Image (cartoon, rainbow, N blue to C red):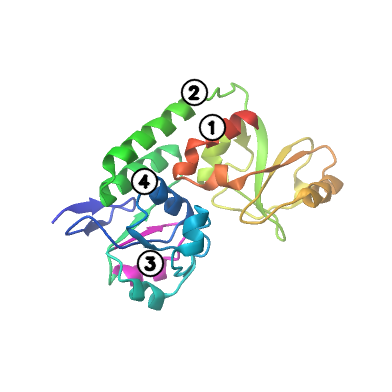
Amino acid sequence: MPSFTDQLGRTLFLPQTPRRIISLVPSQTELLYTLGLDAAVVGITKFCVHPESWFRTKPRVGGTKAIDPARVDALKPDLIIANKEENEKPQIEALAARYPVWVSDVKNLSDALAMIRSLGQLTGATTMATALASTIATRFNQLPIPTQPIPAAYFIWRNPWMVAGGDTFINDMLHYCGFTNIFAGHDRYPTVDLSSLAGPVHILLSSEPYPFRERHIDEIKEVLPEAAVRLVDGEFFSWYGSRLLDAPAYFSDL
């Protein structure tokens, strides 16, 4: 029986290529679509908005952090795809007691490329996944990385204000975008006080998970009049599946 190791070092056994897959991670759901696995994916979450056709038609098993076990059971999966950060450990452990669960742990581009290749092997789409990862790597390698990156803070939440720390995938994407994260010395997503950001600073307001809008730029400028504040598409900074194909072009424009 073939065995596979996920990005947490866990081993799972699959007697055959999965034919009933549930994805609990939006960016990996989009990846499965890109790999041509429409017939094999039988369930997604309510946050798996890409592709729109799947969002409208595929059964949903709850949210990424609020999975409905009964809906999962009804779909009889032979593989569940999860993520260490986006899903809740107790829920995933409960599912893993009944089904094969492959868990990703993506903190940088290298992890993302490894995840893409692994999911290709898991789902019988090795050739397509390998080519996809190669194309993504080439496009990122062609990005001009400045010798003096611009200091920046990447905001993900308001009330309280929260930013991306150094051990996040976002932090790695900031590097490729030509920024250096002023909160790289912090773990995960620390809470910050706006007034503590003294002097000129670049502030990036993400479109997700908090939906920042133009009015929030004015709100920040009231406290930090010298700051350069802009809205950015959070999917290009935090989605680590096939959306990475278009991230380099977006970073270049930004």
Task: Give amino acid for label 3.
Answer: Ile
Proximity of marks 1 and 2: CB atoms separated by less than 8 Å: yes
- The residue that disc 4 covers is 35
Task: Give amino acid for label 1.
Answer: Pro
What's the distance in space between the residues labelled 2 and 4, CA to CA?
Answer: 24 Å
- The residue that disc 2 covers is 142
What's the distance in space between the residues labelled 3 and 1, CA to CA?
Answer: 32 Å
| Lower sequence index among marks 2 and 4 | 4
Residue sitting at the far left: 1
Q: Residues within 10 Å of mark 1 (few under 14, many from 20)?
A: many
The relative height of residue 133 versus residue 19 in the rendered view (above or below) is above
Residue sitting at the far bottom: 70
What's the distance in space between the residues labelled 2 and 3, CA to CA?
Answer: 37 Å
| Lower sequence index among marks 2 and 3 | 3
Q: Secondary structure at mark 2?
A: loop
* Depth order, front residue of 78/191: 78
* Depth order, front residue of 229/41: 41
| Lower sequence index among marks 3 and 4 | 4
Q: In the image, is residue 92 part of the stretch drawn in magenta?
A: yes
Q: Which mark is residue 92?
A: 3
Residue 184 figure quarter: top right
| Lower sequence index among marks 1 and 2 | 2
Q: Residue at x 55, y 22 (%)?
A: 144
What's the distance in space between the residues labelled 4 and 1, CA to CA?
Answer: 20 Å
- The residue that disc 1 covers is 248
* Camera-nearest label, 3 or 4: 4
Query: Where does residue 186 sit, x and y in percent of width and height?
Result: 57, 47
